[in-house]
Amino acid sequence: DQQVKQNSPSLSVQEGRISILNCDYTNSMFDYFLWYKKYPAEGPTFLISISSIKDKNEDGRFTVFLNKSAKHLSLHIVPSQPGDSAVYFCAASVGANNLFFGTGTRLTVIP
Amino acid sequence: ETGVTQSPTHLIKTRGQQVTLRCSSQSGHNTVSWYQQALGQGPQFIFQYYREEENGRGNFPPRFSGLQFPNYSSELNVNALELDDSALYLCASTQGGGTEAFFGQGTRLTVV
């Protein structure tokens, strides 16, 4: 049973435009959400996180939005750069426990 | 500050064999978690160790076992390897109570 879902396996965006990656979850007990970026042959790299008590967290070009009522979060990257091309994983946890990951979205930023 | 390191990076084993994967946690981190990432999937939680004790386990059979040492490094052992065990095995470390896990580069295990 997949508790965290990323329904778009891939996304292509022009350089300089906004990239929006989406994630849905089913477990209402999740209280912490994270985004990771993964390049081939490397482990996931932490990008940005958000606690369930917030609805937005921003770090430079990256913003994560959380809609608890819809059990949905999204990652916005503005402006997108070719170096952002990677697989992005959404993850969620209950407290400081294990992470539940989505299946990932491959982002391609076209120069 | 050193990051999370895993060894080996690649490994090929035969069905039925046993394998040990190793992980050194990030400096100052006392919690280590192991994940299995099959092709085209997200990482799946195997188990977590905190201060040398297992502190949570995912839906994996007992032939997946682990250890954590006093220096917080960790091992993942898999007995009686099956073809479906072929995957990328990721180790992640956190400071106890922390929520941002930092991952190693993974060990690619192929079972033939």
Image (cartoon, rainbow, N blue to C red):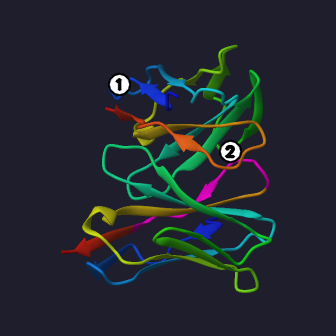
Residue visible at 67% across and 20% down? B68
Residue depth check, mark 1 versus mark 2: number of the one nearer the observer: 2
| Residue at the limit of the structure toward the left, as seen here | A111
Q: Secondary structure at mark 2?
A: loop
Please state which amino acid type lies under the numbered disc 1.
Answer: Thr
Which residue carries the number 1 mark?
B14
Spatial CA span between label 1 and label 2: 25 Å
Q: Main secondary structure of the magenta part?
A: loop
Q: Residues within 10 Å of mark 1 (few under 14, many from 20)?
A: some
Marked residue nearer the N-terminal end (1 or 2): 1
Residue A86 image-quadrant placement: bottom left
The answer as to whether the residues below labels 1 and 2 share one chain is yes
Which residue carries the number 2 mark?
B58
B78 with respect to B111 (left or right): right
Residue A4 image-quadrant placement: bottom right
Residue visible at 45% across and 71% down? A61
A53 with respect to A91 (left or right): right
Q: Secondary structure at mark 1?
A: loop
Please report, as a chain letter, where disc 1 is located. B
- Asked if residue A96 is among those painted magenta in the image, a careful observer would answer yes
Residue B9 spot, x, y in % from top left: 35, 29
Frontmost residue, A93 versus A17:
A17
**Segment tinted magenta in the rendering:** A95-105
